[in-house]
Image (cartoon, rainbow, N blue to C red):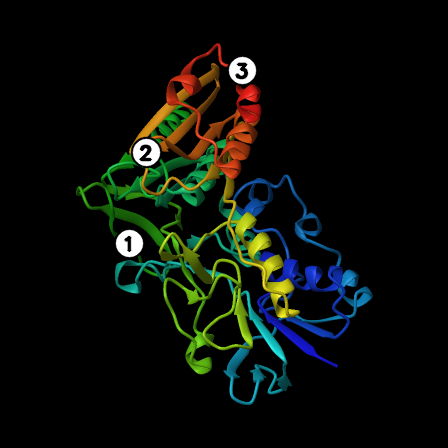
Amino acid sequence: MAHFVVIGAGQAGASLVAKLRAEGFDGQITLIGAEPVPPYQRPPLSKAYLLGDMEQARLYLRPQDWYAQNDITLHLDTRVVSIDATRKTILLSSGENLNYDELALTTGSHPRMLPAAIGGNLNGVYAVRDLKDADAMAPEFGPGRHVLIIGGGYIGLEAAAVAAKKGLKVTLVEMADRILQRVAAPETSDFFRALHVKHGVDIREAVGLERLTGVERVTGAVLTDGTELEIDFAIVGVGITPASILTESAGLTLDNGIATDEFGRTSDAHIWAAGDCASFPYRGQQMRLESVGNAIDQAEIVAQNMMGRSVSYLPKPWFWSDQYDCKLQIAGLNVGYDAVYVRKTADDAVSHWYYREDELLAVDAMNDPRNYMIGKRLIEAGKSPAPSVITDPATDMKALLRA
C-alpha cells in the first residue's frame, strides 16, 4: 500500500490531505505538524482572534477527529529532523523513521525577526505568525498602553487596527516611503493611511527602527530620525521567509523558496511542495505567493499530481485584509503595472484597477465586494475593459462580463 507523507500541518497541508481522500486515494496518509494543535486558519490571528472575537476551536480547519475518521495519521507537536531522499525516509524529532512513496513539503514560512543586536530578543517583542504568538501577545493589549509596530505591510496594519480598537496608543513605523509600498499602488496606500489616521494611529513613513531599548524587557525605541519613544511592547511585521531548511538534507533546488515545476514537483521526482514555501513557474520566473488562496489551490493540484495525474498549476490569485470596518479584497497580481484607475462606488467603497498598457492585471476593492468579484472574473477570463469604461460611473459593470 502506498504511503504519502505531508510535512507541514497548515492550510496547504490540510488542503492536500483532504484532496487526496476526496480524489479517491486509498493508501496511507501521514500529516506531520510542529504545533500541538490540528491545522488552523492563520489570517484571523491578526484580526478576529487577537480582538477576542473568535475562540480557538473556531480557528481549526476541521475537527481533530476528522483526520482519524478519514484514516489520516496526524503527528502533532512533531518536527522533521531530516529527509533521506535516496532511501525515501524521514527522521522525526521523536527518533522514529518513516518511509514514504511520495512526500509533500507544505512547511509554510517564518516571520523575519529583528536582530538581537538591536533588541530583537527582548521580552515584549512579538511577531504574528502562529497561535502561540497570538496567545503570548494578547495580554499586552490593555487600554492606554503604547505599542510600536515595525512594518507597514498588511500584518502590521491589521495589528495596528486591533490595537487601536482596543484603546491602545499606536505608533507604526515604515522604512519605505509609504505603507504597503511593496504590494500596492500609492492610491491604496493613501486610502489605508487615511483610515488609520482617522482611528488615531501615528504612522511614520520613511522612518525605520534604529534599536529597541530595555534591559530584559523592551521599554523604548530609538528611530532612524533620532526620535526616542517610550513603549510597552512591540510587534514586528517586516515580512516572511519560506521555511525551506529541510531541503538541505534532501538536496532540493531552491529558487525563491523550494523550486517546483508547473505540477508542483521539486527537483526530486518523489518530493512535492505547495504553499508559502514553494515557488512555481510563472511568466518566465519562479513566483511564490503568500496567500490562503494559493495554499489551497496549489496543494489541491499537487494532491492530484502525487496520484499520477499531470495537472498544471495556473494561479488565480486572490487576497484579503480586514482593518476596522473596512474589508480589502484583491484579485490578480499587480506586478508590472504602469497605471491605476479609480472607480468610486460610495463614500467608503472604492476600487483601484491596475493596468499594464491595455491589460487589466489586478483590482484592489475596499468595501466593494461587487466590483471585486467582477474584476476577479474579468481577470480570470482574460478580459480588459478600457480604463475609461471602468472609471465611468454610468458603466454597468456586470455587463462587462458578457462583452
State left or right for residue 227 relative to residue 102: left
- Residue type pointed to by label 3: Asp
Q: Nearer the viewer, mark 1 or mark 2?
A: 2
**Residue located beneath label 1 in the image:** 213
Residue type at mark 2: give it.
Answer: Ile
Query: What's under tag 1, amino acid-wise?
Result: Thr
Q: Residue at x 43, y 73 (%)?
A: 245
Label of residue 175 in the image: none
Task: Quote the CA–CA distance across marks 3 and 2.
Answer: 38 Å
Specify whether residue 10 is in view.
no
Asked if residue 384 is positioned above or below residue 320 in the image, the reply reads: above
Mark number, residue 203: 2
**Percent position (x, y) of residue 356?**
33, 35
Residue 26 is situated, as x and y percent measured from the top left of the image, at: 77, 71
Secondary element type, mark 1: strand
For label 1, the crowd category at 10 Å Cα-Cα, with few meaning under 14, some 14 to 19 and many 20 or more, is many
Circle 3 residue: 396
Q: Is residue 140 left or right of residue 121?
A: right
Picture residue at 36% right of the left edge, 66% below the top = 255
Marks 1/3: CA–CA distance: 56 Å
Q: Nearer the viewer, residue 230 or 281?
A: 281
Element under disc 3: loop
Residue drawn at (59%, 64%) of the image: 310
Mark found first going from the N terminus, 3 or 2:
2
Residues 291 and 42: in front is 291
First along the sequence among labels 1 and 3: 1
